[in-house]
Image (cartoon, coloured by chain):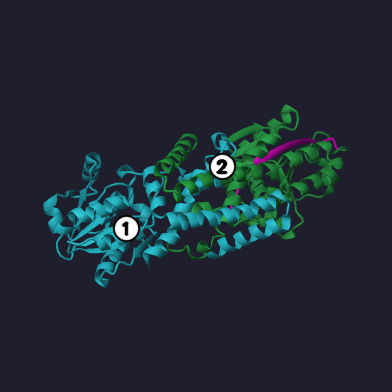
Chain colours: A cyan, B green
Amino acid sequence: MKIIIVGLGLIGGSIAKALKQNTSHQVLGMDTNQDALLDACSCGAIDGKADTADLRTADMVYLCVYPEAALAFAQEHGPVLKEGCLLTDTCGVKEELCAGMAELTGGNYIFVAGHPMAGKERSGFGASDPSIFVGASYILVDTGAPAWAVEQVEGLAGAMGFGRIVRTTPARHDQMIAFTSQLPHALACAYVASPRCEEHQGFSAGSYRDVSRVAAINEVLWSRLFLDNRRALVEELDELNRNLKRIRDAVSQGEEEQLRELLRKAADTKRRVG
Amino acid sequence: MKIIIVGLGLIGGSIAKALKQNTSHQVLGMDTNQDALLDACSCGAIDGKADTADLRTADMVYLCVYPEAALAFAQEHGPVLKEGCLLTDTCGVKEELCAGMAELTGGNYIFVAGHPMAGKERSGFGASDPSIFVGASYILVDTGAPAWAVEQVEGLAGAMGFGRIVRTTPARHDQMIAFTSQLPHALACAYVASPRCEEHQGFSAGSYRDVSRVAAINEVLWSRLFLDNRRALVEELDELNRNLKRIRDAVSQGEEEQLRELLRKAADTKRRVG
């Protein structure tokens, strides 16, 4: 197959490398950043730069860009993709994107929405690394695509090293991601805003390191993701606020029994669900 | 030296193992749990069980028990310790403990307050492991002890593999620990209380794993630590609540510029202070 990766950042770069390492498909790249293209070529992450002719003959296109750019790409280039070309994305929020994709006309491609659940607290092609995928989940979001198309994305995810495929709806994806991914990022950013953070060194250990890790955030990407998933994220922030307040009040009022019960429940949950 | 470890849990067990591995001192143990004593003897973490005669001749005693038990031990056994015996603790909260220790009379021992900044989300002798100390901080809290005594605790911390010694006051220790350690534990417990946590599998990755890790908490120990540091912890919880609300309001009102600025500041802080 001829596969084009649009956007050679952390995720696109890692997908390119994983495909080159684990399959014999031709892998081409597109990026507005010429340095990323050059770096990807010179290290063998891609076989070359894709041009308009390549778009016409591609079997598959991965959109590894921000949600609005994914939609804009499909609108602009969708009509030139060949019939049955498989277009898939890696965006972190799905309801708006899937609704936008469904409204587009004028293309004979098939859209499958995907979300590789992997990342790290650095961005750009220089940070890309296919080992972040090993054992991770790849979420496939229902867009009404035919089974063979979904299975093709699934098969490539397996080849890239993903350990688990999860199928879900756009709404459920966004609700779960608000909790599992967006909330920890919001939390980390609020946590490091304490004046004590400036002086943590020498007083901190594993729990500081873990809760603050993702505060080294790409603020442009994550602001967009937060706003694209506003309703679900605000709901999770409010839920967290209520649960923090229960602990705060038990501590403040010296209610040891109540505090133990809150912590005991948390320990039970964590040990049970991992 | 004859060193007695009182309390062979995660920390006491790890200290016993680290001292046996890295020094030639005689290491004896005391614990109300006979199984922990047996396990520690049979794996060579201690040379044997300490009896009352050993207390009279010990050169150094590590109190690796809850704060109130540390105080009770000093009150009960302090008078039999020999003159100049070095009594030190590993408790996670210091103001109350140091004030309590200062009030005790009837002993000729010297008290040095210490806090090894290491741990993990399991407890008991079975979880003890001296490698958790490697490169970690050992906080020494000023109790007016003579320099040679503080240097002795410091020297042993170095031998155990600690990478950094920090000296501070009880009040500053408790304020910093509220932020670096207690707040992440409270946060993790509040986080996993969301109904979405039950269904996280397949939707979660590194950020979920890191923020929830310490929710597998020892609720009896941590309830006590939270309450012993009530004022400082409530202050940090309120600070976090204000910072979370800023993010929540920016998301809820669709204020992208403001949201970016909050996240950008967080990223700056994290990249700057680590």
Image spot of residue A181 (x, y percent): 44, 54
What is the chain letter for disc 1? Answer: A
Q: Is disc 2 in contact with disc 1, using a CB cutoff of under 8 Å?
A: no
Q: Residue at x 65, y 32 (%)?
A: B167
Q: In terms of secondary structure, where does tag 2 sit? A: loop
Q: How far apart are marks 2 and 1 (CA)?
A: 47 Å
At label 2, the amino acid type is Val
Q: In the figure, B135 relative to B43: above or below? A: above
B163 or B59: nearer the viewer = B163
Q: Which residue is drawn at 65% across and 50% down?
A: A248
Neighbours of disc 1 within 10 Å: few (<14), some (14-19), many (20+): some
Instruction: Return the residue found at the far bottom.
Output: A147
Q: Which residue is drawn at 21% across and 55% down?
A: A75
* Left or right of residue A263, residue A97 in this image: left
A32 or B224: nearer the viewer = A32
State yes or no: residue B114 in magenta. Answer: yes
Instruction: Return the residue found at the far front.
Output: B253
* Left or right of residue B116, residue A114 in this image: left
Point out the stretch of residues depicted in magenta.
Answer: B107-120
Q: Name the residue under label 2.
A: B134
